[in-house]
Image (spheres, rainbow, N blue to C red):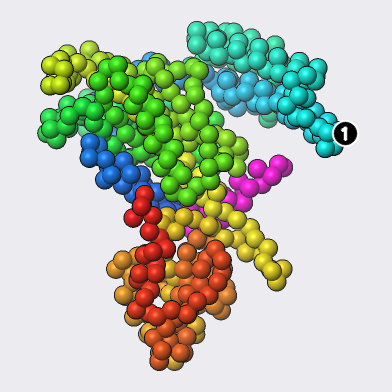
Amino acid sequence: MTNNEDKLKKIISHAKEYGFVFQSSEIYDGLSAVYDYAQNGVELKKNIREAWWKAMVQMNENIVGIDSAIFMHPTIWKASGHVDAFNDPLIDNKDSKKRYRADVLVEDYLAKIEAKIFKEVDKAKKRFGDAFNEEEFLNTNARVLANKEKMEAISKRLYQSLEKNDLEDVKLLIEELEIACPISGSKNWTEVKQFNLMFATQMGSTAEGANEIYLRPETAQGIFVNYLNVQKTGRMKIPFGIAQTGKAFRNEIVARQFIFRMREFEQMEMQFFVRPGQEMQWYEHWKAERMKWHLSLGMNKEDYRFHDHEKLAHYANAAADIEFNFPMGFKELEGIHSRTDFDLKAHEKFTGKKLRYFDPEINESYVPYVVETSIGLDRMFLAVLSSAYNEEVLEDGSERVVLNLPPALAPYKAAILPLIKKDGLPEKAREIMTELQEDFMCHYEEKDAIGKRYRRHDAIGTPYCITVDHESLTDHMVTIRDRDTMQQERVAIADLRTLIFNKIKNKALV
Ligand code: GAP
């Protein structure tokens, strides 16, 4: 097992043990790629959502929010291209009866070649010691160069075939590479078929009169079809944005890696409507703004990078991912897409209604261009959780697991802990709890030794533990312990509110 897989496993079990994320329907042996947020997880998720909403809606006068329904008119998905083009190429192994994404089988094969390159590098590092120049080695070693060339050829062929929808060639490629099913070990494959990712259900009271409708695969279309309503009722002037957060559904075939790829997930999307011709400047603007948001939360800069798309979706003229260094490596966390006027024009065509904007500045009517920012809330949750998770060995040799969450995102801001369960300490602690809970999520706990309670709150990322002892009854002071430094300080009860507020204050969030 690699360290990365190990870290993901630890995060999954920590998330379960400390009430962040549970497998859906666990007592029925679970439902694959569907998860429930537990008592602490729901708070962290809400705080991330609110931080996003504040940055996008509250802080931008020209962006407003909506909350559109999950069910929409089925023709919307025809117009958006999802009925015809929202597909994954699938292949079945006839012996194991297991179904795979054909492109992922080839990508896994490519990852194995890449692993060989890394192995060569490791070997050479050991051989040459300090004199080793990795860049030079990667550009000159014959075996590395041959493997790189092989990777490029395979990936070019795969993407060209997918682009042309030449599924026969994708199958041929799998056969030529002699890719075997990881379960049965056989190379006995079916044809490659396109599989639509949308979930369908019936609307209507009788089966006969029922209409097939879809669970939305993205929240964006709810914004497009409401754009003119919002523009008119909100008297919005271009450029302006519409934001929304909400559930989206995709019948993902390769569903793995915990909450990274789910069948039911939540998106936070914003469509920014601009004058045609100005989309590239707004695309660059939102790329920079979104990256700034991530860093403003206190996330590590080194864990982020941009990945510009070479292969563009059917609706885009430019697209980039913000990638995060998840325990599985750098992967897409957010997408910034210049979607042109594709969606609005398509809705005009399918409805026969004009979706134009009259721009008084240039005295012209046009279908606006759209720049979209789209982030998965669950993926952001995983990014926050994995960067906060730390195992520490303390000076006395003991170990602790701590979530160094940005304080503003932590489920609880403070834990109120009477040192013992008698002598009037619980009553005093309750008084403090009542005082603080109006402003902050606080947790009252009196069970177990104080050290154990500290550890429990370290594990869920509570920035402050407040301990009430016998002296508190007379000097009206308490001991406050900082999660990260574990330093303890004696402070006046009257100062607690300001102290906690200053700790969690983050311009981006509170
Ligand atoms: N409206 C554009 C759109 O939906 P996307 O790249 O397909 O674009 C946007 O999705 C974001 O939604 C991704 O960057 C990712 O964070 C999240 N996302 C997509 N599929 C997901 C899934 N199956 N599980 C969890 N998050 C997902």
Residue 376 is drawn in which quadrant?
top left
From the viewer's perspective, tell me whether residue 286 is left or right of residue 261.
left
Q: Nearer the viewer, residue 64 or 203?
A: 64
From the viewer's perspective, tell me whether residue 428 is left or right of residue 106.
left
Check the picture and name the quadrant holding the N terminus.
top right
Residue 242 is drawn in which quadrant?
top left
| Vertical position of residue 273 compared to residue 346: above or below | below
Identify the secondary structure beneath mark 1: helix
Query: Mark 1 is on which residue type?
Result: Arg
| Vertical position of residue 154 compared to residue 115: above or below | above
- Give me the residue at 47% from left, 64% from top: 463
Q: Main secondary structure of the magenta part?
A: helix
Instruction: Give residue 177's position: percent from left, percent from top.
Output: 70, 15
Asked if residue 356 lies in the magenta stretch, the reply is no
Instruction: Give residue 490's position: percent from left, percent from top.
Output: 47, 80
Q: Which residues are magenta?
A: 1-24
- Give me the residue at 38% from left, 59% from top: 505
Check the picture and name the quadrant holding the C terminus.
bottom left
Instruction: Give residue 455's position: percent from left, percent from top.
Output: 56, 68
- Give me the residue at 38% from left, 36% from top: 289
Which residue does the numbered mark 1 point to in the structure image?
Answer: 127
Q: Nearer the viewer, residue 238 or 14?
A: 238
